[in-house]
Structure formats: structure tokens, C-alpha cells
Amino acid sequence: MYDKILVALDGSEGAQKALEAAVELAHTFGAELHSLAVEGKLPAYAATLGEVDEAKAEKDAFFERIDREAVAWAAERGVELHPSKTVGDPADRVLHFAESGGFDLLVLAARGHSLAHRFHLTGTADKIIDHSPCSTLLVR
Amino acid sequence: MEAHVTELWIAVGIALVALIASIVSVEFGVSITIVEIVLGVAAANFFGLHAAPWVDFLAAFGAIVLTFLAGAEVDVDLLKTEFKGSLLVGGVSFLAPFVVALLFAYYVAGWSWRASEICGIALSTTSLAVVYAVLVETGLNSQRIGKLLMSATFVTDFGTALALSLLFVKPTGWIILFVAVSALLIWRLPKISPRFFGRYGDRVIEPEIKLVFFLLFLLMALGKLAASHAVLPAFLLGLAASRLYATHDIERQRLRVVAFAFLTPVFFIRSGMNVSLSVLGANLSLLAALFGVKLVAKFGAVLPLARGFVGKDSVFFTLLMSTGLTFGTISSLYGYQASIIDQAQFSLLVTVVVASAVIPTVIAQRWFRPKTDEEGDD
């Protein structure tokens, strides 16, 4: 039914549930599984470049870690996960990646990891569902 | 209450505001700078937090440390590669709003000439860090538009620092000493510091930070004697140290830690504490007019040039050149502490500066963001 599945990761509890669902589906259908982590906004209106650089470095390290953990977690369940990472608007980047990659299922969480992300991701999930080029599974 | 107990409670209040600002910044992904200013406004206007002389002293030093860091973050090689373009764009980006805002404040708002000069300087700035955050986030920092924006902003910052140091100078003998010592330090620091960093750096007692603090305090003291401001030599001293810091990132990181943990919170919270909400409420039309003056002047001067350099992305480019934050706040606080502007004028200028950090950035990102190389094949 599904040959190529994309799961959106952000390190949150919700994203872990989305990963679990995506791994199970990939295992069931023998589908190719990819993940995309979109590094969200850097501190806008910063006072020094150092503040921006440090936030970027922290985000890079954070997303590298969640990619590593997701790949290991999927491998333990017999599924090979292909991780990718990008920057920009989360909804735009996920939609662009899903469309250009020819995915037939997109899996994402309903809630993100911080207070701001919780509010923001609801809008992100809404936007992705509205414009998704393929079937979309929203995991709660 | 005994004086020293009162001062301790002021310290408790400022430390609490700084702590809350950090938590808000992390939870909502907003820069600490604006949160500190906004919470400073709230603490003074709603909870009666007031400053003491030591707060003003630390805030002034925080401003100089920020200026030094801004200079130390300049990418000299980048500036060289875009030298002509950045000189032209960055030059008019400083000059046009400086002149237009100065004339507006003097002839329309009825401010004194010196207060109008502060207005011109505060509204002429472009925020390097705001520009940089947008460029890194969008991946444009490696493209030509990003490089030109960064290098033009260096030039605008330099113009601001130059104006702030020169315009209020009183010609006395001290100015000769101030200029001579500043020039000597800027010339010798790149030669002395590698040996100093090599022998004394990377230790928990941080001799290299103490060296920087000593030099900055010396510049502040001499600047005060000369009735000038240490912002230009501090910026140039940072610039002189930028290559050294590029290869000693740990030392730069530690300086930032000291600055961000203690000095810059005092500077930004103190700036917010000076803002009177009742004054702002009574002067909303002037507030809007000053904001409009900054944007119109930046657009009038930068947009035609930007069209030549970046074509269809010229509005995005100009909006980012219209942002301001740190140098605008530094200029305003200097004007207030030197009694050149009053609290009402300070409140208006800082609010316009903060608004110019937020509004053009949001508009640029939402409606005018150029496509990156990655998005180009959509």
C-alpha cells in the first residue's frame, strides 16, 4: 500500500510516537523510510552574532543527536531509516521534501517540544495537512 | 531602609528579571535582547524597579563590551571581497537616515540640536545580528546577497560608532591623549595579544578577559575625560582583535559568557527601565512618525542601490538594512546618561529601535524572502 514513507522529526515526545508509527508501517508494508528534521527559527532580534552562532550550533547538535537515535531505534526494529535535515519554515520544507521525494505517506506529530512549538506546530500540522501531496498520518 | 539594603534589593530585582528573561527566551525561541528590554519596561512601569548609580555604570560598561564584541565579530575578509558595494550601500544606509532623522527631530519634533543628533545616530543603525540571524536561518549567508548585506552592515555600524564618538567631542587637551592611546591600543593589540593569549590564555582565571576589560575601562575613562565616547575605539579594538578571536574561539566564547551572564542583561534591562509607557502613550503619533522616518530614509537611499546589486531581492535587502537594535540602544542610552536627551526622548527612540528590529524583519521574511539555492528548483 505504501512504498515510500516520510516522518517529520523534532525531538519531541509526539515526534517519537510518529516515528514509532512510521517504523511499524514501514515494517508492515516493506516500505522505504525517510525522516526529515527541520531546524526551526534561530533567535530573531539577537544582540550579537555569537548568540546566533551558538543557537545554530546547539540546534545542529540537537538534530544530529535525534537523527542518530531515530536511526538506531528503527534499526533495532529491522527498518533502515534514511535521515535528512534542513533549515527554514517547517511546513514549507516538509511539503517541499515530500513532493520532490515522491513520498506516498507522510507521518507527523500533532504536538512539538516547547511551549512555542506547541502553538506553532499546530499551525504547521494544519498547513501540511491542507497542502500535502500525499496521504498524511497525524499521530497524537 | 539602609542604602546598601535598598541597592541589594535592586540587584535582586534585576537578577530576577534577567532570570525570567532567559526562561522566556528559551521557551518561546525569542532573542534574550528584546525580552530583557520588554521586561525592564514592565519592571519599572508596573513594579517600581528603579536604578542605582552602579546599575548605570554596569550598563555603560555592558554597552562598551557589546561594541567590542560587535567589532570582534566583523569578518574582515568578507568586507574586503565586497568592499566597493558595501562601502556604498553601508555608507548611504548610515548617512541618509542620520540626516533625515536629525532634521525631522530638529525642525518637526522641536528637539534640541544635540538631541536631534542622538536621534539621527540611533535611527541610522542596522542590526548586524538581526541580519545575520535571518541569513543563517534562510541559508542566504553563503550567497552574494548575504555577503553584501553583512559587509554593508559592518560599514553602517562603523558610521554609527564614528558619529557617536565624534559629534559630542569638546576640543580639549584630553582628546589628544584619548585619540593617541586609542590608536596605540588598536595598533598594538593584534601584535601583543597572540603572545599574551598563548602564555596566559585557556585558564580558569581568564587573564585574557581581564586584559580586554582593562583596555575597555581605560578607553571609557579617557573618553569621559575627553567628553567623548569610547564606542568607536572599542569597536575598532574589537575589529583589531577579530582575526585573533577567529582562531581562539574558546576565548571569544568565554568573553560572551561573561557578557551575556551579567553585563548585557544589565544594559538591556536598564535600557528598558528608562522607557516610560505613559510618555509613549501620549506621543504615539511622534513614535509612528520617527519609525516612518527611519524606514522612508532607508528605503529612499538603499533601495535604488540595492536594485543594482541584487535586482529582484532589493526590497528584502532594504528591509533588512532597515533593522536596528544594539547600536540604536547604545546610542540612546549614551544620550540619556550624558543628559543630551530626556526620558521622553529616550523612551521614543528605544521603542522605535526595538520596533525596527521586529517589523522590517517579519515583513522581509514573510513576504520578500528570496529563494535559496536549495529551493530554486521548485
Image (cartoon, coloured by chain):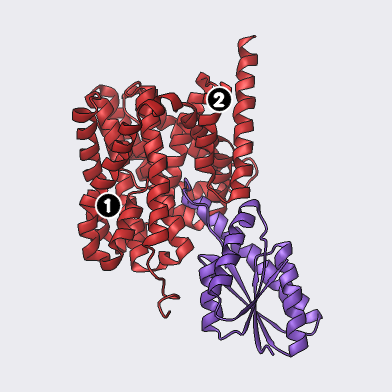
Chain colours: A purple, B red
Identify the residue at horizontal 38%, vertical 57% (top origin): B364
Q: Which of B196 and B89 lies nearest the eye of the viewer?
A: B89
Q: Are marks 1 and 2 on the same chain?
A: yes
Q: Which of A40 and A4 lies nearest the eye of the viewer?
A: A4
Q: Position of residue B65 (x, y in %)?
A: 47, 38
- For disc 1, the chain is B
* Residue A122 as seen in the image, left or right of residue B327: right
Query: Which numbered circle lies on residue B46?
Result: 2
* Residue B91 as seen in the image, left or right of residue A71: left
Say what amino acid the circle numbered 2 marks: Phe
- For disc 2, the chain is B
Say what amino acid the circle numbered 1 marks: Gly
In the rendered view, would you say A6 is above or below B291?
A: below
Label 1's element?
helix
In the rendered view, would you say B226 is above or below A92?
A: above
Q: Which of B165 and A136 lies nearest the eye of the viewer?
A: A136
In three-dimensional space, the C-alpha distance between marks 1 and 2, rounded to whole angstroms, equals 40 Å
Residue identified by numbered label 1: B90
Residue B276 visible, this orientation? no
Q: Earlier in the sequence, mark 1 or mark 2?
A: 2
Q: Position of residue B50 (x, y in %)?
A: 53, 21
